[in-house]
Image (cartoon, rainbow, N blue to C red):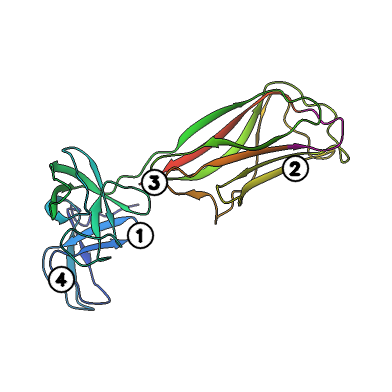
Amino acid sequence: MQAVFIQEGSSIDYTPGSAVSAGDVVINGALVGIAKRDIPANTAGSLATEGVFDIAKANEALSFGDDVFWDADGDPVGGTVGSGAATATAAGSTFLGRVVKAALAGDKTVRVLVVRNRVPADQIALVAVEDLAAAGDVAARPVFAHPGGAELVSAGILTQGAPAGVDDANTVVIALKDDAGNTIVTKTFDTANQPPSSDFGDLGALSATHKALVGDEHVTLDVTQGGTTSDMPAFVLVIRYRPAA
């Protein structure tokens, strides 16, 4: 036996470390729950994980069917600054559900169908890079951005031919960086580590610190061909990413 049924999941058991009031939105990791009743500290209670709720919102208009997110530090209309608010902005927020009654910017609440958390599927971005001349470089070329923010999962190159002249004195360095110039991933090709020839090659482990991007943040590409003979063929940059939930 690999699993035992416990409950339907429209509500879940929850024991808070500090008191929770009825109507509080509770975030634990990527899980959103709403308290339907007061729950004293260190006392077993429950959170609703689906249903229709009127939820405090930020000063923005929301249309029927919009995805809506919970910003734990958001500023609710007519409420306490920084106490949390529903918003259409995904970056830095947690997916809450979908709007079932449109709200104007000045409305204090929006009616939301709370649904169990959406897990965004990984997606692929393909960026063509031209055949560079021997020892030719690319510097800080924007190659990726996502309006809602994203986390990069992996990056690699699919070469369109054979490299030439790559050795320890004529290296090729491929790097992806964020808007602040922080390195997300870098790979050095040399005598022992040749670029792939008409094949795919992974660029290696991504920086745990810099692989997460906020909305509209750019990823830039550097290709540095050292020496005089290093000559990369045209290639496709393959970026696997996960949109912000």
| Up/down of 185 relative to 202, above or below | below
Q: Position of residue 155 (x, y in %)?
A: 58, 39
Q: Earlier in the sequence, mark 2 or mark 1?
A: 1
Residue for point 20% across, 53% down: 9
Residue 29 image label = 1
Mark 3: secondary structure: loop
Numbered circle sitting on residue 188: 2
Q: Is residue 121 left or right of residue 106?
A: right
Q: CA distance from mark 3 to mark 1?
A: 13 Å
Q: Residue 64 occupies which quadrant of the picture?
A: top left
Is disc 2 placed on a helix, strand or loop? strand
CB under 8 Å between discs 2 and 4: no
Q: Which residue is mark 3?
A: 244
Earlier sequence position, callout 1 versus callout 4:
4
Q: How many marks?
A: 4
Q: Amino acid at mark 4?
A: Ser
10 Å crowding of disc 3: few (<14), some (14-19), many (20+): many
CA gap, disc 4 and disc 3: 28 Å
Question: Which comes before the other along the chain, label 2 or label 4?
Answer: 4
Distance from disc 2 to disc 1, alpha carbons, whole Å, reads 36 Å
Does the residue at mark 2 contact the one at mark 1 (Cβ under 8 Å)?
A: no
The type of residue carrying mark 2 is Thr
Which of the two discs, 4 and 3, labels the residue nearer the N terminus?
Answer: 4
Q: Which mark is residue 163?
A: none
User: Which residue corresponds to the image point at 24% horizontal and 72% vertical from the top-left?
Assistant: 15
Residue under label 4, please give it.
21
Q: Amino acid at mark 3?
A: Ala
166 within the magenta span: no
